[in-house]
């Protein structure tokens, strides 16, 4: 800080001249320590003995010097040193080429080349520029090499080019010499003929004609020699070029076959093809701005940071002047899909990118279902995943339940299926409920089997199933169910819910007695009455839209879903379009697990996932018809996930249910199903009943692949009964099983096709049920 004082001067007489005074500079800044030495050394960062002494700022005076005529130069010099920002540096002394005092900013003998360029750093910088320039030129050359045609045509063009080079231009000289030789030969022939037929009596004319013939003949001979020489030169040049062109490929093929057999032959042919294709390439002639071309993943381009910026700008996710922050560079995973982790510009939330999935797919040149955007850890960070092909269109892999060697654990996590990244997803249904929806043919039954089979394979789970479709999709599970409604009868389902409400009340009474708040796995294992209970309702729409029982069913289901979770009752509903007219919103909002399969409209998707899900970028409408079994699963986390359910064929379902039946039988939890007619007959303690049971056993012994035989000859039945110890005659059997005249008609039997009279199975069952009042 400085302070200027202008001292006043006394007036003087006009005749006396007063010297002007200089402004006094008062230095108020305290003395500063000596700064650290600065080394301007291009060879070393460490001081040595040859380094000059560090520059020291002269101390600033604390008292303003007296100004007088003799002190003016001292003041000016002090002010110049203090106010100068760049103190005068001492000359640098270096050994070797720069021995003595050298200013590296001075130019050498070559104009515009400073001495610094002769230092190692200067040489490295100059050679680096040269290297970078050559590398850029090479990259430009490589970018111009992609052919405009296919590789086969490229190879054909290379062969043609090589052959044209082998042929060369010597043929023009040969043709010219040939033409000259032909012309001169014809002229020589004409001159010889003229000389021959010129009469000798003409004297001088004869002599002139003979000389002209000799000259023409000599010129023709010279032309023929030149033609032969041109042909020889042409053949020699062609043979040399042919050896250069065709020698290496033939050598490579022959050597490869001799050294490696068929594999070496293939390698030689492949190398020959590659060389020919390279020779036949047709590079772009003009220099293009490759960075301005639109890059598309759908066209096979690789994902790069400029492509991401370009696509996100086109999708209006970021502004035209904004850029993405690349946290994880774009890379290919094992499935051939592109993945990247990106930071959006400040102030842009991740949900904006999620909502723009359709626009991003259009910018990338792929289908909407191929693009997956999810929030990653923070509000402005996203994970982008773009699959190479439409996901979930390949054949589904076998489900993990097929590999079970022991009972499943329904208290643990249930396998659902892979997501678009191939990562297997699983959920927990403990104290939860779910809703599965989608259009017809979207795969609701197959998707529901993942949960139903997991419950069936756990012997501790109690099954209550209601099939509102009445189509038999749940019929294979019937023998494992405590309660089953398969006739699509709303009245029967209403009665089932009444029974289930009574079960829930009994469970809460037991929990209250035990002093527990909810059912746990330990309690369920200790008290069979508290085992997990799964209520599965297929095609809920049929029950809730019934005029008489619809509202009652909705009210009871809402009661079960809201209060049954703590009692170990899990409810799952499946329907086509769970709108408010199908499922009351008060019930639908209680179902915590949502699984939206393919839907025709975003509104239909919102009826499953919740209002606003489609606007946030989660719409089941984007699921293509080829992606059967795929859906948006919202079970855990803050966002839905695209998942394809594990698929099990009918044969695999039968195999798993047979395994579940055996495990439940061993655990003693297999429900008491309907008693077969044979067992009912044996329980009658009657001789005729035992005889009819033996007849039914005979029909079962001659079963086909679809079940028991539908018809057997009477004599065969009598022989089988006598072998089993039943003394029966044809008359007694006919009286016991009375047939109509049509049923008594003979039918072909056996390999010979002999026509025999017999008994149909339906008539035997009708006789047994009608006589003893039983049910088949």
Image: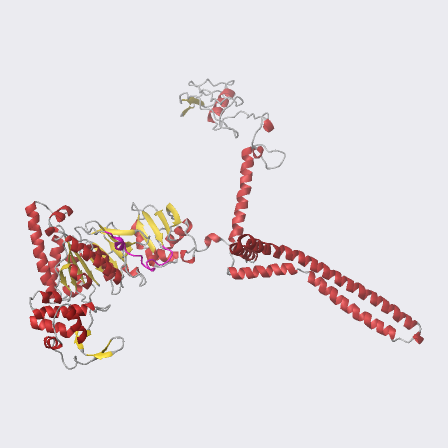
Closest to the observer, 380 or 503: 503
Residue 24 percent across, percent down from the top left: 44, 22
Q: For residue 753, which quarter of the picture?
A: bottom left
Above or below residue 325? Residue 114 is above
So how many labels did they put on this image?
0
Left-right relation of 85 to 110: left
Q: How is the image coloured?
A: secondary structure
Left-right relation of 21 to 570: right
The dominant secondary structure in magenta is: loop
Asked whether residue 611 appears in the rendered view, the answer is no
Is-magenta flag for residue 767? no
Residue 85 percent across, percent down from the top left: 47, 28
Left-right relation of 57 to 382: right
Q: In the displayed orientation, state which residue is furthest to the bottom.
A: 741
Q: Quadrant of the N terminus?
A: top left
Residue 257 percent across, percent down from the top left: 55, 55
Residue 234 percent across, percent down from the top left: 70, 60
Closest to the observer, 59 or 504: 504
Q: Quadrant of the C terminus?
A: bottom left
Q: For residue 4, which quarter of the picture?
A: top left
Asked whether residue 206 appears in the rendered view, the answer is yes
Is-magenta flag for residue 389? yes
Q: What residue is rendered at 85% in x and 69% in y?
A: 213
Q: What residue is rendered at 59% in x and 33% in y?
A: 107
Q: Point out the stretch of residues depicted in magenta.
A: 387-405
């Amino acid at each position: 800080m400085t302070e200027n004082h202008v001292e006043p001067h006394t007036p003087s007489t006009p005749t006396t001249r007063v010297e002007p005074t200089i402004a006094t500079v008062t230095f108020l800044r305290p003395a500063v320590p000596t700064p650290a030495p600065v080394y301007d050394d291009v060879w070393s960062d460490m001081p040595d003995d040859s380094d000059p002494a560090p520059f020291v700022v002269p101390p600033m005076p604390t008292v303003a010097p007296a100004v007088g005529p003799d002190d003016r130069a001292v003041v000016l010099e002090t002010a110049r040193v203090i106010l100068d920002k760049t103190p005068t540096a001492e000359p640098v002394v270096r050994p070797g080429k720069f021995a003595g005092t050298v200013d590296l900013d001075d130019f050498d003998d070559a104009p515009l080349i400073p001495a610094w360029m002769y230092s190692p750093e200067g040489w490295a910088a100059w050679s680096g520029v040269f290297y970078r320039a050559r590398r850029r030129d090479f990259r430009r050359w490589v970018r111009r090499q992609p052919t405009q045609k296919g590789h086969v045509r490229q190879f054909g063009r290379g062969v043609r080019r090589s052959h044209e080079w082998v042929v060369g231009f010597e043929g023009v000289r040969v043709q010219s010499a040939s033409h000259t030789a032909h012309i001169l030969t014809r002229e020589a022939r004409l001159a010889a003929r003229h000389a021959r037929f010129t009469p000798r009596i003409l004297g001088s004319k004869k002599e002139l004609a003979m000389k002209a013939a000799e000259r023409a003949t000599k010129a023709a001979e010279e032309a023929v020699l030149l033609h032969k020489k041109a042909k020889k030169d042409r053949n020699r040049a062609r043979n040399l070029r042919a050896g250069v062109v065709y020698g290496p490929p033939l050598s490579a093929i022959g050597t490869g076959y001799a050294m490696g057999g068929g594999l070496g032959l293939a390698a030689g042919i492949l190398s020959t093809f590659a060389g020919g294709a390279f020779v036949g390439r047709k590079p772009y002639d003009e220099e293009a701005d490759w960075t301005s071309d639109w890059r598309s993943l759908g066209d096979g381009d690789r994902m790069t940071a400029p492509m991401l910026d370009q696509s996100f700008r086109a999708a209006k996710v970021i502004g035209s002047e904004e850029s993405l922050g690349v946290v994880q560079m774009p890379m290919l995973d094992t499935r051939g899909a592109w993945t990247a982790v990106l930071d959006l510009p400040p102030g842009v939330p991740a949900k904006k990118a999620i909502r723009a999935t359709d626009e991003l797919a259009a910018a990338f040149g792929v289908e909407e279902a191929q693009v997956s955007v999810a929030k990653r850890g923070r509000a402005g960070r996203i994970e982008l995943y773009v699959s190479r092909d439409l996901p979930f269109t390949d054949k589904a892999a076998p489900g993990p339940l097929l590999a079970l060697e022991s009972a499943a654990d329904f208290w643990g996590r249930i396998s659902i299926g892979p997501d678009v990244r191939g990562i297997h997803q699983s959920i927990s249904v403990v104290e939860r409920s779910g809703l599965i929806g989608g259009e017809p043919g979207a795969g609701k039954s197959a998707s529901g089997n993942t949960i139903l089979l997991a419950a069936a394979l756990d012997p501790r789970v109690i099954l209550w199933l209601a099939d509102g479709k009445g189509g038999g999709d749940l019929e294979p599970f019937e023998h494992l169910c405590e309660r089953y409604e398969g006739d699509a009868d709303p009245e029967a389902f209403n009665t089932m819910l009444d029974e289930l409400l009574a079960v829930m009340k009994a469970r809460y009474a037991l929990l209250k007695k035990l002093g527990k708040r909810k059912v746990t796995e330990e309690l369920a294992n200790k008290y069979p009455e508290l085992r997990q209970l799964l209520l599965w309702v297929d095609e809920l729409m049929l029950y809730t839209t019934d005029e008489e029982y619809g509202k009652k069913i909705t009210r009871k289901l809402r009661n079960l879903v809201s209060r049954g979770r703590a009692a170990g009752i899990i409810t799952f509903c499946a329907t086509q379009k769970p709108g408010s007219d199908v499922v009351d919103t008060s019930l639908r909002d209680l179902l915590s697990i949502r699984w939206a399969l393919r839907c025709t409209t975003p509104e239909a998707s919102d009826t499953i996932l919740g209002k606003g899900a489609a606007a946030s970028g989660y719409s089941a409408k984007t699921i293509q018809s080829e992606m059967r079994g795929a859906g948006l699963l919202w079970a855990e986390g803050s966002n839905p996930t695209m998942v394809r359910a594990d698929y099990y064929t009918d044969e695999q379902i039968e195999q798993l249910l047979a395994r579940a039946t055996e495990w439940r039988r061993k655990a003693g939890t297999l429900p008491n199903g309907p008693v077969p007619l044979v067992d009912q007959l044996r329980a009658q303690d009657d001789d005729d009943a035992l005889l009819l049971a033996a007849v039914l056993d005979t029909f079962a012994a001659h079963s086909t692949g679809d079940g028991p035989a539908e018809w057997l000859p009477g004599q065969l039945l009598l022989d089988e009964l006598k072998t089993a110890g039943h003394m029966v005659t044809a008359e007694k059997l006919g009286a016991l099983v009375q047939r109509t005249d049509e049923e008594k008609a003979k039918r072909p039997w056996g390999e010979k096709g002999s026509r025999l009279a017999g008994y149909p199975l339906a008539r035997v069952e009708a006789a047994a049920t009608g006589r003893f009042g039983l049910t088949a």
